[in-house]
Image (cartoon, rainbow, N blue to C red):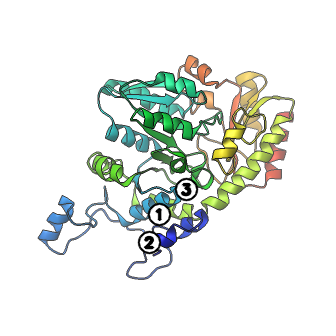
C-alpha cells in the first residue's frame, strides 16, 4: 500500500485507483469483498479489547468491515479529508451528521434549494427540538441574517438540485466559523473529481454514493468525510449504535466506481455542456439552468470553485406540466427515473417526483415550476442524445 507521504503527491485519478486498499493474504490485485457479519478473535482477552476499543481490529460488520473501510479510506483521500464513515444511503449520511452533532435547542441554517427529501428531513428534525431556517443558497447576506446564537450548522448543496444554483463555499464556511458553527457541503453533483469543499474551508462533506461515486445505478449508499476527531468521537459511536450501515457488497461496488470517477465526471461534464448550449437555442425552451453557461448567475463562482461544471442540467419548457410530460414521454435515450449520476442518461420531472412531497408554495419559492425538466447526462454519444432531444422537442 502507498505510504502517506507518497499519497499526498498523487493526482485524484491515481488515488481513485490505488488509495485505501492493502493486499490481503492472497496478494490479490483487485480488492476482495468481506461478506461476513462478524469476525473471530484469538482469545477472550482480545475479544474484550476489540469491543472496548482499546485494540484496533474488526468486530462486527455493523461498524467494522475491511471492504467498507477500504472505501472510506479511498474517498477520504480523494476529498482531501482526514477520515470518512460510510452509511447505508445519502439520506442516512445527512441524518447521521445532524443527530451525531446536534442536540435539542440547536439551530441549522440550510439552503432552501436542496433535494426535496433533504428539505423534508430537516423539517422533521423540529420534533426533536432542532430548528432549521431555509435561505436562498446564493444570497450570502440571507445566510448571515439567519444566524442565531444557537446556530451550530450550515448545510448546503452546491450546485443545487435541480436548478444548479452555486453557493460560495469559502464565504459560507467563514460565516460558520465566525459563529462557532460547522459548514457541511453535500458534494453529490460534483464529487471530488470536480470540487473539493474541504479545501475551500468546509468542515464536513456528505455524499450520496448512489449517484456518481457508483456511476452505474447499481447500489445505494452514503458517506461523510470529516476531521478524524469528529468521525471517531461523534459519527462512529452513532453508527455503531444506530446502525445506518453500508453493506460490504455495496462498499465494494463503490470502491470500484471510484476507479473511473475522474474519467466519467470529465465526460459527463463535456456532454452536458454541449447539450445545455443546444437547449438554450431551442425555441420551445424558456430557460436552461447549467453553471457552464456564461449567462448562469453564478457562472464565475462555479468556474472558481469547480474544475468543470458537472453532468446535471435543467430546463424550463414552454407550456407547463402538460408539455414537459410530452417531451419526457417522447425521449428514447433518457430513462424516466429519479436517480442521477448513471452511465445512462436520465430525465426527471422534479415537481412531481424528487420534490413532489413539498408544498406548492415551497416549490415556487425554490423556483421549481411545472415545466421544469432535469437531465442527468450519461455517457452515451452526445450526438445521439442531442438528436433525441431535438426529436422530442420538435415533435
Return the mark for residue 323: none
Q: Identify the secondary structure beneath mark 1.
A: helix
Asked if marks 2 and 1 touch (Cβ < 8 Å), the reply is yes
Please tell me whether mark 2 sits on a helix, a strand or a loop.
loop
Mark sitting earlier along the chain (2/3): 2
Identify the element where label 3 is drawn: loop
- Tag of residue 32: 2
- The numbered mark at residue 214 is 3
Count residues near mark 1 (Cα–Cα under 10 Å), then give few for <14, some for 14-19, many for 20+. Answer: many
Residue 388 visible in the picture: yes
Q: CA distance from mark 2 to mark 1?
A: 8 Å
Position above or below: 296 against 73? above
Give coordinates of residue 311: x percent, y percent.
68, 47
Mark 1 vs mark 3: which is more N-terminal?
A: 3
Q: Position of residue 69 (x, y in %)?
A: 39, 62
Q: Quadrant of the C terminus?
A: top right
Label 2 with label 3: CB-CB less than 8 Å: no
Q: Tell me which residue sits at (54%, 23%) in the image.
A: 142
- Say which residue label 1 marks: 252
Q: Is residue 335 visible?
A: no
Q: Residues within 10 Å of mark 2 (few under 14, many from 20)?
A: some
Left-right relation of 74 to 235: right
Amino acid at each position: 500500500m502507498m505510504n502517506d507521504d507518497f499519497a499526498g503527491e498523487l493526482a485524484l485519478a491515481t488515488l481513485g485507483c490505488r488509495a485505501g486498499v492493502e493486499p490481503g493474504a492472497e496478494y490479490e490485485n483487485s480488492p476482495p469483498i468481506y461478506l461476513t457479519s462478524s469476525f473471530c478473535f484469538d482469545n477472550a482477552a482480545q475479544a474484550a479489547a476489540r469491543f472496548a476499543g482499546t485494540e484496533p481490529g474488526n468486530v462486527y460488520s455493523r461498524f467494522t468491515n475491511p471492504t467498507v473501510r477500504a472505501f472510506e479510506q479511498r474517498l477520504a483521500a480523494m476529498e482531501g479529508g482526514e477520515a470518512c464513515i460510510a452509511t447505508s444511503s445519502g439520506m442516512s449520511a445527512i441524518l447521521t451528521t445532524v443527530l451525531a452533532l446536534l442536540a435539542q435547542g440547536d439551530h441549522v441554517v440550510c439552503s432552501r434549494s436542496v433535494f426535496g427529501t433533504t428539505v423534508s428531513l430537516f423539517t422533521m428534525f423540529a420534533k426533536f427540538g432542532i430548528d432549521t431556517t431555509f435561505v436562498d443558497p446564493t444570497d450570502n447576506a440571507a445566510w448571515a441574517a439567519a444566524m442565531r446564537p444557537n446556530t451550530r450548522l450550515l448545510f448546503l448543496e452546491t450546485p443545487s438540485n435541480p436548478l444548479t444554483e452555486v453557493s460560495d463555499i469559502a464565504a459560507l464556511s467563514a460565516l460558520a466559523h465566525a459563529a462557532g458553527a460547522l459548514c457541511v457541503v453535500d458534494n453529490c453533483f460534483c464529487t471530488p473529481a470536480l470540487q473539493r469543499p474541504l479545501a475551500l474551508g468546509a468542515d464536513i462533506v456528505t455524499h450520496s454514493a448512489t449517484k456518481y461515486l457508483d456511476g452505474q445505478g447499481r447500489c445505494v449508499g452514503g458517506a461523510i468525510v470529516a476531521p478524524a476527531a469528529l468521525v471517531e468521537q461523534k459519527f462512529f459511536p452513532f453508527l455503531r449504535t444506530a446502525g445506518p450501515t453500508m453493506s460490504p457488497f455495496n462498499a465494494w461496488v463503490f470502491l470500484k466506481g471510484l476507479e473511473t470517477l475522474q474519467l466519467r465526471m470529465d465526460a459527463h461534464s463535456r456532454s452536458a455542456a454541449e447539450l445545455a448550449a443546444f437547449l438554450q437555442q431551442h425555441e420551445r425552451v424558456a430557460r436552461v439552468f447549467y453553471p457552464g453557461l456564461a449567462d448562469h448567475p453564478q457562472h464565475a463562482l462555479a468556474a472558481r470553485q469547480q474544475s468543470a461544471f458537472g453532468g446535471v442540467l435543467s430546463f424550463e419548457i414552454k407550456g407547463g406540466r402538460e408539455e414537459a410530460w410530452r417531451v419526457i414521454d417522447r425521449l428514447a435515450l433518457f430513462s424516466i427515473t429519479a436517480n442521477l449520476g448513471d452511465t445512462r442518461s436520465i430525465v426527471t420531472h422534479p415537481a412531481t417526483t424528487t420534490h413532489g412531497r413539498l408544498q406548492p408554495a415551497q416549490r415556487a419559492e425554490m423556483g421549481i415550476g411545472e415545466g421544469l425538466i432535469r437531465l442527468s447526462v450519461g455517457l452515451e454519444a452526445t450526438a445521439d442524445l442531442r438528436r433525441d432531444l431535438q426529436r422530442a422537442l420538435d415533435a
